[in-house]
């Protein structure tokens, strides 16, 4: 019984010692999520502009698809940022 208690105390101490690293990892994760979302939305926008320039008659449909896709990317990025903030707390 005492060895189990000592083992649990060691686990709790290890978690307490790694708390600053978890916050650092959460900060890096939030930064990566923001950069990836910006890249994704930029790529969606550039592809939409290219396709609208090649076929101007479908520009409205392309714009609608672009806005929906950008909203999905932004939603995933927001979810990732919330998870990172929850880890940091």
Image: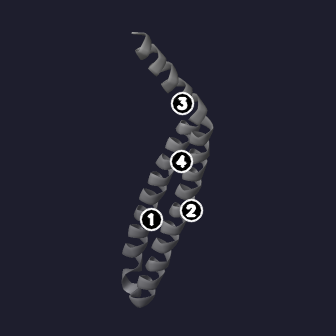
Q: Which mark is residue 67?
A: 1
Q: Is residue 45 visible?
A: yes
Q: From the image, state whether disc 1 or disc 2 is nearer to you.
A: 2
What is the crowding at mark 4: few (fewer than 14 residues within 10 Å), some, or many (at least 20)? Answer: many
Q: Residue furthest front?
A: 3
Return the residue at label 4.
81
**Dot 4 or dot 1, earlier in sequence:** 1
Q: From the image, state whether disc 3 or disc 4 is nearer to you.
A: 3
Confirm or deny contact between disc 2 and disc 4 (CB under 8 A): no
Q: CA distance from mark 3 to mark 4?
A: 26 Å
Q: Residue at x 63, y 38 (%)?
A: 20
Confirm or deny contact between disc 3 and disc 2 (CB under 8 A): no
Q: Quadrant of residue 32?
A: bottom right
Q: Which mark is residue 35?
A: 2
What is the crowding at mark 1: few (fewer than 14 residues within 10 Å), some, or many (at least 20)? Answer: some
**Dot 1 or dot 2, earlier in sequence:** 2
**Secondary structure type for disc 4:** helix
Return the residue at label 3.
14
Q: Quadrant of residue 89?
A: top right
Image coordinates for residue 78, horizontal then vertical, percent = 51, 49
**Secondary structure type for disc 1:** helix
**Dot 3 or dot 2, earlier in sequence:** 3
Q: Residue furthest bottom?
A: 54
Image coordinates for residue 9, horizontal then vertical, percent = 51, 19
Q: From the image, state whether disc 1 or disc 3 is nearer to you.
A: 3
**Dot 1 or dot 3, earlier in sequence:** 3
Q: CA distance from mark 2 to mark 4?
A: 11 Å
Q: Residue at x 52, y 68 (%)?
A: 39
């Amino acid at each position: 019984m005492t060895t189990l208690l000592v083992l649990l105390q060691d686990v709790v101490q290890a978690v307490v010692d790694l708390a600053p690293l978890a916050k650092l990892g959460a900060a890096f994760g939030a930064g990566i999520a923001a950069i990836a979302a910006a890249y994704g939305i930029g790529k969606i926008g550039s592809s939409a502009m290219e396709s609208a320039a090649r076929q101007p008659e479908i520009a409205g449909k392309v714009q609608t698809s672009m806005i929906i896709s950008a909203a999905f990317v932004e939603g995933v990025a927001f979810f990732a940022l919330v998870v990172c903030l929850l880890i940091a707390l």
